[in-house]
Image: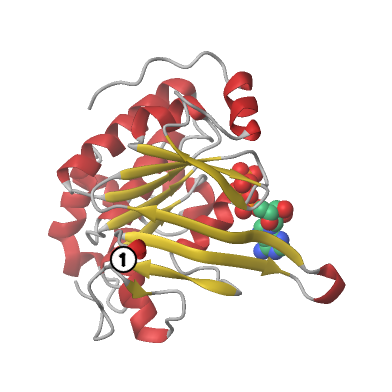
Amino acid sequence: MTLPAEKAPAAGPAAGKLVAEHVTVVFGHGRRAHTVLDDVGLTVPEGTTVGLVGESGSGKSTLAKAMVGLVRPRSGRILLDGAEVSGLRGARLTAARRRIQLISQDPNSSLDPRMRIGRALAEAIDPRRADPRAHADQIAAGLEMVALEPDAARRHPHEFSGGQRQRIAIARALVARPEVVVADEITSALDCSVQAEVLNLLARLRAELRLTMLFISHDLAVVRHVSDSVAVMHRGAIVERGDIYAAPSHPYTRRLLASAPSLPPKETR
Ligand SMILES: Nc1ncnc2c1ncn2[C@@H]1O[C@H](COP(=O)(O)OP(=O)(O)OP(=O)(O)O)[C@@H](O)[C@H]1O
C-alpha cells in the first residue's frame, strides 16, 4: 500500500515513520474553547515503539485520534513517511487510514455487538466489499494471528471473553496489514492476568509484522515493558521524552514515577 503522489521522502527534523509536528487541538468555540493539545511534537521512528504516558485528561487519546486522522488539528501537521495526513479527505484519507490503525481501550464499544466477527474483519479488509466469503482466507489468517479458531468468524462479540474481544480488536486492526499501530490504553479494561496475555500477543505481532507503534497508557510499568522510548504528556503538552526512568528531569515525571507502584526491571526483547 502506498499513499498517492504527495508521498515524499522523510527528511530533516521531521524524519520518522509517524510524526506530530506542532499539533494544537482545540475543542469548542469562543468562550467555551478548550485547548486540549498545545504545540505537541512527537516522532515515532520506523520499527520502534514509543510509549506515551500521562494522567487522565492530559490529552493522550486526543493525540491518538489526531495521529490516525479522526481528530483534525487546528494547527500543526501529522506526517506519515514524511507526507502530511492531517489535511487529507476522501479516498486519500481512507488510504492513509489503512496504513495507520487505532486499537482503543474498550473492545465493547469498538466492536459492533450485532456484527459477526467475520464481517467486522471483512470490513477492515475492504470497506466497499465487506463480504466475509470473499475474504475467508485472510479472515482465518487474521484470527489465527491472535490464536482464535476460524469458526470465531461466525460468532458475535458477546460470545467471547473481554480478553478474547480485545484480541479480536487487534486482529481487526492488523488484518489489513497496517504499517503503524496506535494502541490507546488497550489493556486498561482487562484483568491483570489477561493484560499480560494481550501485551505479549501484541509484542509478538509487532516483531512479526515489523510494526511501528505508538503505545499509550497511564500505567508506567506497562509502558516500560513494551516501549523503546517514552514521552510524557502533561496538560496537553509533551513535557519530557527519552529514558524517563533513569533520569527524569521534569517535576511532573518525577511525581509520576514516585507515585507508580515499584516498577519491575525492563525485560529485554
Ligand atoms: N470531543 C471532545 N469534545 C470536547 N472535549 C473533549 C473531547 N474529547 C476530549 N475532550 C477533552 O479533552 C481533554 C483530554 O481528553 P483525552 O481523552 O484526550 O485525555 P486522556 O489523557 O486520553 O485521558 P483518559 O486517559 O482519561 O482517556 C479532556 O479534558 C476531555 O474532556
Tell me if residue 250 comes above or below residue 176 in the rendering: above
Q: Quadrant for residue 19, please give it.
A: bottom left
Question: Image quadrant of ligand 1?
Answer: bottom right
Q: Which residue bears the numbered disc 1?
A: 12
From the viewer's perspective, is 223 left or right of 10?
right
Q: Residue at x 24, y 86 (%)?
A: 5
- Tell which of 205 and 74 is nearer to you: 74
Instruction: Residue 132 in the image: state x and y as whole percent.
Output: 24, 64
Q: Quadrant of residue 79?
A: bottom left
Establish if 162 lies above or below 140. above
Residue 233 lies left or right of residue 26; in this view the side is left
Q: Measuring 46% from the left and 80% from the top, which residue is drawn there?
A: 87
Question: Is 29 situated left or right of 214 in this image?
Answer: right
Quadrant of the snapshot with the C terminus: top left
* Res. 165 image quadrant: top left
Going by the numbered disc 1, the residue's amino acid type is: Gly
Q: Is residue 124 shown to the viewer in this render? A: no
Near mark 1 (Cα within 10 A), the count class, few <14, some 14-19 or many ≥20, is few
- Residue 151 picture location, percent across and down: 23, 46
Residue 238 placement (x, y as % from top left): 56, 49
In this orientation, which residue lies closer to the viewer: 232 or 178? 232
Q: Residue at x 60, y 26 (%)?
A: 254
In the structure shown, which secondary structural element does the residue marked by tag 1 occupy?
helix
Q: How is the image coloured?
A: secondary structure
